[in-house]
Amino acid sequence: MKRLLYYTDVLPLLSKKEAAIDKLERNLEIFASNKDKIRVIWHPYEKSEEYMKLNDFELMDKYRQIIEDYKKDGYGDFDESGDLKALADSCDAYYGDYSDAVYYMQESKKPVMIQNIDI
């Protein structure tokens, strides 16, 4: 089974709000429907909730519920380790927002796809 590193940054959530939440939900639905082929390792930016609080992010409860549901559904792992290099090394491909892990994956010649909130 392939391991997919899914990284989400806080900036799209703060700037695109509902569109970013919708994209997140659609992605997780797609991942869930392919759970027999991939194991998703979701790693959100470590300070996402901190920045959401600072910016009075009105969708915080919805975001937290998405995380809770993801953890409960069991088709992937929720990573809060902060070690993107080790995480990238342990995964077969990358999908998500820009992060340092993109460069780690590229160095290892692993596939990288950057998500587009507007698609």
Image (tube, helix red, strand yellow):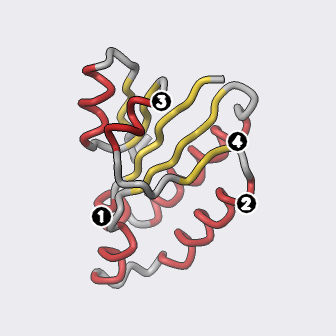
In which quarter of the view is residue 39 placed? top right
* Residue identified by numbered label 3: 91
Kindly check if marks 4 and 1 are in contact, taking CB atoms under 8 A apart as contact: no
Closest to the observer: 38 or 108?
108
User: Residue visible at 40% across and 51% down?
Assistant: 8
- Which disc, if any, is residue 116? none
Mark 2 / mark 1, whichever is N-terminal: 1
Q: CA distance from mark 3 to mark 1?
A: 29 Å
User: In this rendering, which labeled residue sits more in front, label 3 or label 4?
Assistant: 3
Residue mark closest to the camera, 2 vs 1: 2
Label 2 sits on a secondary structure element that is helix
Where is the N terminus found, in terms of image quarters? Answer: top right
Marks 4/1: CA distance?
26 Å
Callout 1 amino acid? Ser
Q: Residue type at mark 4?
A: Ala
- Circles 3 and 2, Cβ within 8 Å, touching? The answer is no
- Number of residues whose C-alpha sits closer than 10 Å to that of mark 2, classed few (under 14), some (14–19) or many (20 or more): few
Residue bearing mark 2: 72
Quadrant for residue 119, please give it: top left
60 sits to left or right of 56: right
Amino acid at dot 2: Lys
In this rendering, which labeled residue sits more in front, label 2 or label 4?
2
**Earlier residue among tags 2 and 4:** 4
Where disc 1 sits, the SS reads helix
| Residue with the mark numbered 4 | 32
Measure the alpha-carbon separation of dots 3 and 4: 17 Å
Q: Position of residue 113 (x, y in %)?
A: 39, 29
Count neighbours of disc 1 (C-alpha within 10 A) and say few if under 14, some if 14 to 19, many if 20 or more.
few
Q: Nearer the viewer, mark 4 or mark 1?
A: 4
Question: Which of marks 1 and 4 precedes in the sequence?
Answer: 1
**Dot 3: what SS?**
loop
Give, as a three-letter code, the residue at label 3: Cys
